[in-house]
Amino acid sequence: MKQAKDIRDSYIRFFTERAHTFVKSSPVAPQDDPTLLFTNAGMNQFKSIFLGDNPKNLSRAVNSQKCMRVSGKHNDLEEVGVDHHHHTFFEMLGNWSFGDYYKKEAIKWAWELITDVWGLPKEKVYATVYTDDDDAYEIWNSETDIDPARIGRHGAEDNFWEMGETGPCGPCSEIHFDTGEGTCIYENDPNHTCGVNVEGCGRYVEIWNLVFMQYNRQKDGTLTELSAKHIDTGMGFERIVRVIQGVRSNYETDLFMPLIEKMEALSGKTYEFGEAGIPFRVIADHMRALVFSITDGVSPSNDGQGYVIRRILRRAYRYGRKLGFTEPFMHRLVPVVVSSMGEAFPEVAERADYVASVIEGEEARFDKTLETGLTRLEELAEAYRAAGKGVISGADVFLLYGTYGFPADLTALIAREYGLEADEEGFAEEMRKQKAHDRSLRAGGDDQGLSPDGWTILSHEGGTVFTGYDTARDTVQVKRYKCVDDHTGLAVLDKTPFYAEKGGQCGDRGEISFGDITLSVVDTIVWNDMIVHKLVSDVPLQESWFTQAGTAVIDTERREAIRRNHSATHLLQAALTEVLGDHVDQAGSRVDAESLRFDFTHFSALSSDEIVQVERLVHRWIMEDTPVAAEEKSIDAAKKEGAKALFGEKYGDTVRVVSMGEFSKELCGGTHIDRLGKIGPFKITGESSVSAGVRRVEAVSGAAAVELFQQTDALLKETATLLKVPREALPAKGAELIKTIRQLERELKEYTAQSAGKEAGEILAAAEKNRHGGVACLARNVGELEKDQFTAMVDEVSDRLKQPTHESVAVVLGAAVQGKAMVAALAGAAAAKILPAGEVVKAAASKVQGGGGGSPVRAQAGGKDPAGLDAAMEAAVTLMQERFSAADE
Ligand SMILES: [Zn+2]
Ligand SMILES: [Zn+2]
């Protein structure tokens, strides 16, 4: 059997032999497209070329791209593993022509590769072309020996591809393969006839899509011919491996079987093709997604990509229970993924230990959550039953899902044990709301005009040269621009001193002037490989400005602060490694003008002592004033020297290595000070947890650190003056004050209880003078009180009414507490039989715009209007007199 890795290799070799450049897969978590949560197609990293910018002058490319699809029309997470062809993580093989070869070569080579190199039987291969695409039809007919009967014409739904509502698009030609009888689950369904492009058919599978980009869709919907035509192809790797290996399902290929076999060994259960195989398939699929995304720098969290990863992990863990796993097991599958994928994607091998520890930490955490969730669900079921409700609301089912990861069917199952149902319809509605919310979050990047349409392109030549390492000012020419509205715009330049947000360092700000006009640059970002300047103008933007040469100047004071913080971040990483150990790996960072933040792998909180050690070390290096060196070299040379790389970062063949003495060497494109002494003072301001196994340290340097010292000093001085002690004595003084306050609180409590006792006696005596039908009753507005005082008084009266001597007494008390009304009704046992306290409190509460209730002997209510308290007492008295008198007759 041909192995998956040989199939991948032979695809790449086939095209490199035909002058294609092999391009490494970009990370699965994209860094320069805010509108995209995960890389979802091979063409993502070439988007800028299709949009007209080709800095490396690439004409042909081939690769295998790591992709993730977790939501959207065709990929609901809940379907993955239930069937045999949906995946969260998958590879997409692709070959590209950028304005080079076109339809003829694309089709001829595709046919040659699948039938000649891979030897798929020609009589089982089908081709489709777009209805109007006579060229493609003719090429299939004349350039290949496919049976013309197996070339079909299809409509736009299947055979026309668009990047978005506007932008590059064109017809496509798909290749389908007949996998034979017995592979379609609808085979015996009278409403289904197996065939190419038949919805849901498992027998005729699409293996390759060749897109011919020949048009540009305008805003008004019309198509214009592109001057340079492109080829963009995509082949689902798991699917082609299944076809070539001749197995029934993607999961039976050697991409998934080793994982399934390992699970069989660990669980003692046997994999099956049908329903019993679902847990195996879910876990096998999800393991690959977890290993690749965590390797590329995503950590489980509660939003964005991290939330998707957390959901995937939890879904797999729950399915693990069905295989009998009762404790963390998924981390033990990491080496299996590494051994089958580590050769093609070396990053997963390099990062394996880290990935396993993150997964194990998150599993253990979720295990605890599941236990808590189970308890919560039991409580909830109990409460529903007590309230006489038979259906757990959709909102509660959703809460259990969102907070504890309980799927609706599990909740329904447990609810049934309590004789309850779960509102699954209501749950689905809540899910729809959540999804709409997710979608709006994802679309978030678009509101700043970062979409392919609306650009005016002045020059296609080359990319943007970044000159900001050495200079703060440059003469520039606009390559493309876009007016987002009258006063804001975007511009890409031929060269720029502006650093665009990348690698954790924030974008520069400053100004660009054209003649007399000066525009503010409020941010600089990377978008599809381009450095985009966000412009704001006081006067309405005019397109004519952008055709002249301009002067770009960065805000140097701000940049200096950023430089200091960035260099300090490198020192911080080196110091953390020295103090805590070699397991410290960068998990993310954020550097701006105000402060810096560094996330790294470590499993416990830093002690105060460790923080002091790290700060001392950083300062020692700063005071040594070592020069900072930056050097460009090949990525292999840099790695050989031991330069630290950031995982999930897209590195080119040449990288920049930033070194500080012997203690720090990192791959880094950021801007740094030239000597470490310029950092000035440095201070850690915070330490916290980001997720299981990842800690965060926050710090300040330079002027911000001086300011922090001054503020802290002023604060101490002010406090010491206020407390009239020298500052060294502040902690002792604080402890003493706390002790005194506790003592006073105790005394106050005793006093309140005493006075409540006194008042209760007085209230009961007053009630005795007011008997109706044998029941002593009284309602009294006690005026303004603290809540504790009122409660103490009510407790005291309530206690006394429990005694047999007071069983025929009823008392109502009202008070104004912090601007609100409080009413309590209390009754002895005999009085309560005639008139329950709940009824009295209701009558009284209606006069203070409130409501409440309680037991027959004690009821309480709150109200908005304390001015109504007298009327409330009157209503209570009237009701008590009436009912107690009547009972006597
Ligand atoms: Zn079928
Ligand atoms: Zn750096």
Image (cartoon, grey):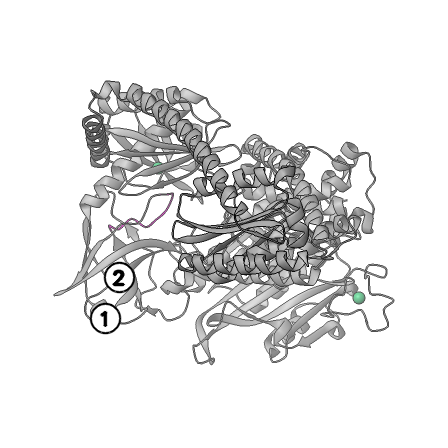
In the rendered image, residue 499 lying in the magenta stretch gets the answer yes
Of the numbered discs 2 and 1, the one sitting upstream in the chain is: 2
Q: Residue at x 62, y 72 (%)?
A: 159
The stretch of residues the image draws in magenta is 497-504
Secondary structure character of the magenta stretch overall: loop
The amino acid type found where label 2 is placed reads: Leu
Q: Which residue is under mark 2?
A: 535
Given residues 434 and 648, the one toward you in this image is 434
Asked if 464 appears above or below 802 in the picture, the reply is below
Q: Which residue is under mark 1?
A: 541
Counting from the top left corner in percent of width and height, residue 456 is at 33, 70
Q: Residues within 10 Å of mark 1 (few under 14, many from 20)?
A: many
Residue 808 appears left or right of 319: left
Residue 113 is at least partly visible in this image:
yes
Residue 15 appears left or right of 760: right
Residue 3 appears left or right of 702: right
Query: Cβ of disc 1 within 8 Å of ligand 2?
Result: no
Query: Hey, which residue is sitting farthest left in the picture?
Result: 516
Circle 2 — which element? strand
**Quadrant where the C terminus is found in the figure:** bottom right
In the rendered image, residue 362 lying in the magenta stretch gets the answer no
Q: Residue at x 46, y 23 (%)?
A: 582
**Quadrant where the N terminus is found in the figure:** top right
Query: Cβ of disc 2 within 8 Å of ligand 2?
Result: no
Q: Residue at x 21, y 65 (%)?
A: 537
The amino acid type found where label 1 is placed reads: Leu
Circle 1 — which element? loop
Counting from the top left corner in percent of width and height, residue 60 is at 50, 57
Q: Are marks 2 and 1 in contact (CB under 8 Å)?
A: yes
Counting from the top left corner in percent of width and height, residue 552 is at 20, 55
Q: Residues within 10 Å of mark 2 (few under 14, many from 20)?
A: many
